[in-house]
Image (cartoon, rainbow, N blue to C red):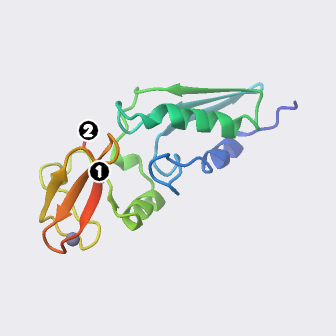
Amino acid sequence: MAVSATESEVWEALREVEDPEIPGLSVVDLGIVDRVRVDEGEIEVDITPTFTGCPAVEMMRREIELELSRLAERVRVRVTFERAWTSDRITKAGREHLRRSGLTPPPREGSIELQVRAKCPYCGSHDTRIENAFGPTLCRSIHYCNACHQPFEAFKPV
Ligand SMILES: [Zn+2]
């Protein structure tokens, strides 16, 4: 198989890989792709999961390998924590997608939001409470908005 994949083709392919827990959100928009290297028929991708305990990591890794296997003979996906993932790595499109899905992006690191309560994605109110710290997945929690009386999910702050 001729090696013709370029780094931008790899990034393009990665946009097709969705976060298993958030349909429609690509791993690129989530900001977990740390680095892409293309070298003599081998693609190496470094990913930094949003949460260390996230069981979706293995799944994502396999999906990335599958997606990229049509671009190169060898694909390696490395999980790295060299540079910690922060919510600042979510792209603008990714934030918009989370908001539309009723998910609150995790508070920006070092921001005041870390001390306050989760912001309601529907009305923007901070008058919220944690309903259930153990959401549908290990990475999310259920909150309830006192202002508009709607439950919503949020990422757990790390
Ligand atoms: Zn609300």
Q: Quadrant of the C terminus?
A: top left
Residue at the image position 46 percent from the left and 45 percent from the top: 31
Of callouts 2 and 1, which one flags the residue occurring earlier in the amino acid sequence?
Answer: 1
Residue at the image position 32 percent from the left and 55 percent from the top: 105
* Nearest to the observer: residue 24 or residue 124: 24
- Report the residue marked by disc 2: 158
Mark 2 element type? loop
- Marks 2 and 1 in Cβ contact (< 8 Å): yes
Q: Residue furthest right?
A: 2
Q: Position of residue 54 (x, y in %)?
A: 38, 35
Q: Quadrant of ligand 1?
A: bottom left
Q: Residues within 10 Å of mark 2 (few under 14, many from 20)?
A: few
- Report the residue marked by disc 1: 106
Residue at the image position 53 percent from the left and 37 percent from the top: 60
Q: Position of residue 117 (x, y in %)?
A: 14, 56
Q: Position of residue 23 (x, y in %)?
A: 50, 55
- Whether residue 99 sits left or right of residue 117 in the image: it is right
Q: Position of residue 68 (x, y in %)?
A: 69, 37
Residue at the image position 23 percent from the left and 65 percent from the top: 120
Residue 151 in view here: yes
* Image quadrant in which you'd find residue 2: top right
